[in-house]
């Protein structure tokens, strides 16, 4: 399974390179196309794990001015 992430940056927040560093520290890989980042799970995951991971993303981006959308398929 993979979790895809779309980021919306704010000109009132931190620079995109800072946001990228924070996301990469969580295991995300930058990508091009319809999504900005991807996280590749080692095995199938349940909704609880995805929600906990979403919480980590939320906490990592807190104070950056960035908004995000996760999609796990």
Image: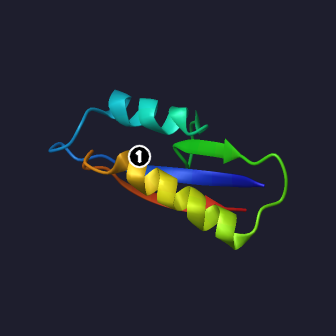
The residue positioned 55% from the left and 48% from the top of the image is: 35
Q: Position of residue 73 (x, y in %)?
A: 73, 62
- Residue situated in front as seen by the camera: 6 or 48: 48
Residue lying furthest bottom in this view? Answer: 47
Q: Position of residue 18 (x, y in %)?
A: 34, 30
Residue lying furthest right in this view? Answer: 43
Quadrant in the rendering for residue 44 = bottom right
Q: Residues within 10 Å of mark 1 (few under 14, many from 20)?
A: some
Q: Is residue 63 above or below residue 30?
A: below
Q: Is residue 11 above or below residue 15?
A: below
Question: Which element is circle 1 on?
Answer: helix
The residue positioned 49% from the left and 60% from the top of the image is: 55
The residue positioned 14% from the left and 44% from the top of the image is: 12
Q: What sort of colour scheme is used for the picture?
A: rainbow
The residue positioned 55% from the left and 39% from the top of the image is: 26
Classify the position of the N terminus by image quarter.
bottom right
Q: Is residue 73 above or below residue 30?
A: below
Q: Is residue 29 above or below residue 34?
A: above
Q: Position of residue 10 (x, y in %)?
A: 23, 47
- Residue situated in front as seen by the camera: 48 or 7: 48
What number of labels is visible? 1
Residue assigned mark 1: 60
Q: Is residue 57 left or right of residue 42?
A: left
């Amino acid at each position: 399974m993979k979790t895809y992430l779309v980021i919306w940056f704010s000109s009132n927040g931190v620079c995109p390179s800072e946001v990228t560093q924070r996301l990469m520290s969580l295991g995300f890989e930058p990508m091009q196309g319809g999504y900005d980042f991807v996280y590749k799970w080692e095995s199938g995951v349940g909704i609880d794990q995805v929600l906990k991971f979403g919480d980590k993303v939320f906490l990592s981006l807190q104070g950056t001015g960035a908004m995000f959308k996760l999609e796990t398929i």
